[in-house]
Image (cartoon, helix red, strand yellow):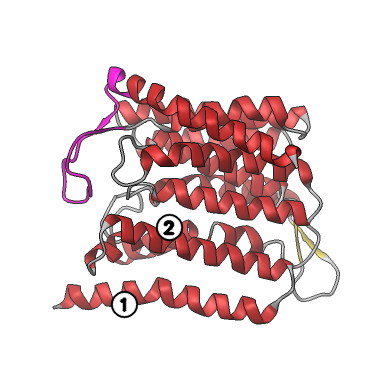
Amino acid sequence: MNRFILPMLVAFLISYFMTPVAKKIAVKVGAIDVPKDNRRVHTKPIPRMGGLAIYIAFTVCMFAFSELEFTKLLGIFIGSTLLVVMGMVDDVKPLRASLKLVIQLMAALILVKFGFKIDFLTNFFQDSGYIFFDKLSIPITIIWIIGITNTINLVDGLDGLATGIATIAALTLAYVAYSMGNVPVAVLTLMLAGSSLGFLPHNFNPASIFMGDTGAYFLGYILAAISIEGALKGTTAITVVIPVLALGLPIFDTTFAIIRRAISKKPIFEADKGHIHHRLLHIGYDQKGAVLILYLISILMGATAVSIINKDMIIMSILMVVTSLMIFIPIYRSLGLEKE
């Protein structure tokens, strides 16, 4: 049991005690989130760059406890450090979206270079058999990494929201990896969960610090790498569904945002108040209430993934119906209020 609990506990403690240090650094370098428009939910300046504590906790534990092969650990370290540096700069002075995309592409290529690739998916239409990507393997892997890297950042709109969702996703992926016999990935994922949980007491409403782009891009990047090495390495037809469910809420919210902005003919990367957490606030929930509901949705999606692994189709069906209702009812109600 120490093999699983100790790394997670150490990561939690390092993150918890490093967060005040990250806060001092943020104040010193001017990484302060000042509400300048009505899209912001908070009303007073709050330091960001708290993700630095999550990064330090995870990195220390990764090299101290991880059983994953060193080459892949090195790839994770180099790529995540690149994104953390980018995030720290962005938290002080916002970078152009195009520049951030280039840096994210570089970070994705680093993972590919160090052996993280989606080589195949199982064929849903055959009892056995695979769909091999061949030359498309690298582009598909890069799209997945960049996509998941950005999803956490896009849901980082309320105190503790992105931190909690990332933690729930990490715990789900840890269970998935363990169920598939991939203990090294399970341990690594628990370290990420511990690092996020250590930051959460400082970040939950009322937050004293935000994770900023430093933390959001880091968490998304590590979750992308873990999902490739863990869930997507499986050889059953359900493996492609598992990481999508584990990361379901940020994936859905990002997809919905892209579609919404495309229909409105707005730039895809332009921020707005159409995210699901904004819609929950719009229909009357306060920050804590909205965040807790979104935690519950994430937990239900994670439970759906677990029920699929356990081949409990009845529970899976019930969870999917309940989760869908919890997502679409707030959207429907908020649309009704907008028309009034």
Q: Specify the principal SS of the magenta part.
A: loop
Q: Which residues are magenta?
A: 26-47
- Residue 275 visible in the snapshot: no
Label whose residue precedes the other's in the sequence (2 or 1): 2
Relative vertical location of residue 175 with respect to residue 216 in this rendering, above or below: below
Q: Amino acid at mark 1?
A: Tyr
* Label disc, if present, on residue 254 of the rendered structure: 2
Q: Residue at x 47, y 35 (%)?
A: 102
In the foreground, 107 or 223:
223
Relative vertical location of residue 75 with respect to residue 139 in this rendering, above or below: above
- Residue linked to disc 1: 332
Relative vertical location of residue 197 with respect to residue 175 in this rendering, above or below: above
Q: Residue furthest left?
A: 340
Q: Amino acid at mark 2?
A: Thr
Q: Nearer the viewer, mark 2 or mark 1?
A: 1
Q: Is residue 14 magenta?
A: no
Position of residue 261 measured from the top left corner of the image (x, y, whole percent): 32, 60
Sort mark 1 into few (<14), some (14-19) or many (20+) by Cα contacts within 10 Å: few
Horizontal side of residue 23 vs 175, given as left or right: left
Q: Hey, which quadrant is residue 57 in on the image?
A: top right
* Label disc, if present, on residue 20 of the rendered structure: none
Horizontal side of residue 139 vs 196, given as left or right: right
Quarter placement of the C terminus: bottom left
Q: Is residue 29 magenta?
A: yes
